[in-house]
Image: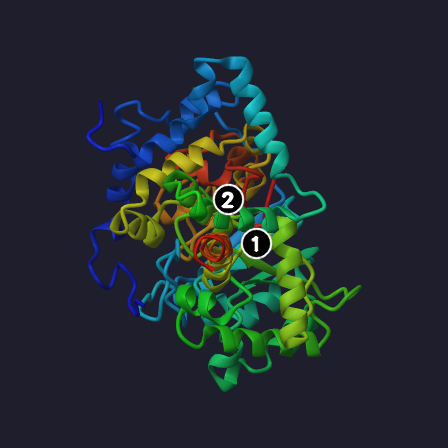
Amino acid sequence: MATKSLKARNNDIANTSRQLEILSNGIFADGELPTFAAKIKETNQFPLRPKKLEILQINLGYMCNQVCEHCHVDAGPDRKEIMTIDTMNQCLEVIKNTGAHTLDLTGGAPEMNPNFRWFVEEASKAGIKDFIVRSNLTIIRANKKYYDLPEFFKKHNVHVVSSMPHWTRGKTDKQRGDGVFDKSIKALQELNAVGYGMPNSELKLDLVYNPSGAFLPGDQMALENDFKKALKADFDIDFHSLFAITNLPISRFLDYLIASENYEDYMYSLVEAYNPAAVKNVMCTNTLSVSWDGNLYDCDFNQMLNLKVASKVKHISEYNEEILQNRNIIINQHCYGCTAGAGSSCQGVVA
Amino acid sequence: MSKSYYDASDLRKFGKITEWNEELGNKFFDYYGKVFEEGALTAREKSLIALAVAHTEQCPYCIDAYTKDTLQRGVTKEQMMEAIHVGAAIKSGATLVHGVQMMNKVNKLDG
């Protein structure tokens, strides 16, 4: 199990242009597989354009208490990129005027940003309807100062979305680190105790499943049933929905695919599972991603590949929704990850 | 020609069998797809049966395909190993139960 980010290890893959080179060369350069652009051209979906903006996804920093095997953010305790209060203020200005109804806070562990609570309180005052925090669960048990997070989330009616790769300890710890399963279970029980995830509760608790290796997620509904049955029977845990998310071939997962000699087979699986119906609803068509330093991206994955929006407006300080919405979405071969099978997004399947 | 009888990348080309006989090929794939749909058995149960049979048939393509398929359905490696023991038990049982035939013959010839 890795304990450092690729960046701290000076791994070649930490270089985003190297990742883009890998995704553009080999089987895609020699025509063995069609590029994503060629594929969406078949159904006249090129260029990909945004629809109505619904979700503003803000990355509060890459610092995390965990170092998960396949993290697309390459997050970890050694990452020091954290959103400053100045950038948060710029985000708040946008939140007050945006047409988006959902604010989606992510990281790293967003709770590790020292101004996280202040930001949630201010954004709450600004009147966002749906408020998502992507919490890794273990943060709630990581330090005393986080123990009251469930109460804090409840106070602001935050919709909690948490990663949980499997209902067994072995598979969860292999992917997310030793001890993560037990701490996650404890955190889920604490969230349940304040009302999160209970049947008919307004306090929404959803789980995110992503595969532990070089394979695609199975049927979201079937997995949700399996998770519900097992977590209820073993730990008396309740939650609302399960989002099945496909691992995109970038960052640590790309490094893993190459090192384990699964890269080509995985890309074949993604291309074979390509579903044109999923293209219509890919999340970049209704989401904007803001990085810790205020730059704007089509999605969290493009953020990690350092592919800023193709617009005159590239930073939150110069935000203009009308200009931004009139742009072409930047695509590359990693986009096949969002269009495989029933599709994949931060909210689960899309088709 | 390839140097070995089996090539892992041939599995991806399975669909191409329709190119030499479209009607029968399509009928087979329609049937195959239908068999694995959710029914009185769940798709997950069917996948585990397929994994066990893949081993008793000793089909490397099927083993690759259903190891991946069961993983996608959240099956654990403990469950996968138990499933193939079921296949192995039937295989060895099928061998050994013929021992009764041998015993009958011995009793007849040399009883």
Question: How are the colours assigned in the image?
Answer: rainbow
Query: At x 42% / y 62%, what residue is drawn?
Result: A61
Let me know if marks 2 and 1 both belong to one chain: yes
Given the image, what chain letter belongs to the residue carrying mark 1? A
The answer to whether the residue labelled 2 contacts the one labelled 1, judged by CB atoms less than 8 Å apart, is yes
Q: Foreground residue, A306 or B100?
A: B100
Counting every numbered tag in the picture gives 2
Q: Position of residue A59 (x, y in %)?
A: 47, 57
Q: Is residue A93 visible?
A: yes
Relative placement, left or right, of A85 versus A102 is left
Foreground residue, A128 or A194? A194
- Up-down: is B5 above or below A60? above
Q: Amino acid at mark 2?
A: Tyr
Q: Position of residue A45 (x, y in %)?
A: 52, 23
Q: Position of residue A38 (x, y in %)?
A: 41, 22
How far apart, in angstroms, are the residues tagged by discs 2 and 1? 9 Å
Q: Quadrant of residue B29?
A: top right
Residue shown at the point (32%, 37%) measured from the top left: B8
What type is the residue that disc 1 sits on? Glu
Q: Which mark is residue A319?
A: 2
Q: Secondary structure at mark 2?
A: loop
Q: State the quadrant of the N terminus of chain B.
A: top left
Left of A230 or right of it: where is B52? Answer: left
Label 2: how many residues lie within 10 Å, few (<14), some (14-19) or many (20+)? some
Asked which secondary structure carries label 1, the reply is helix
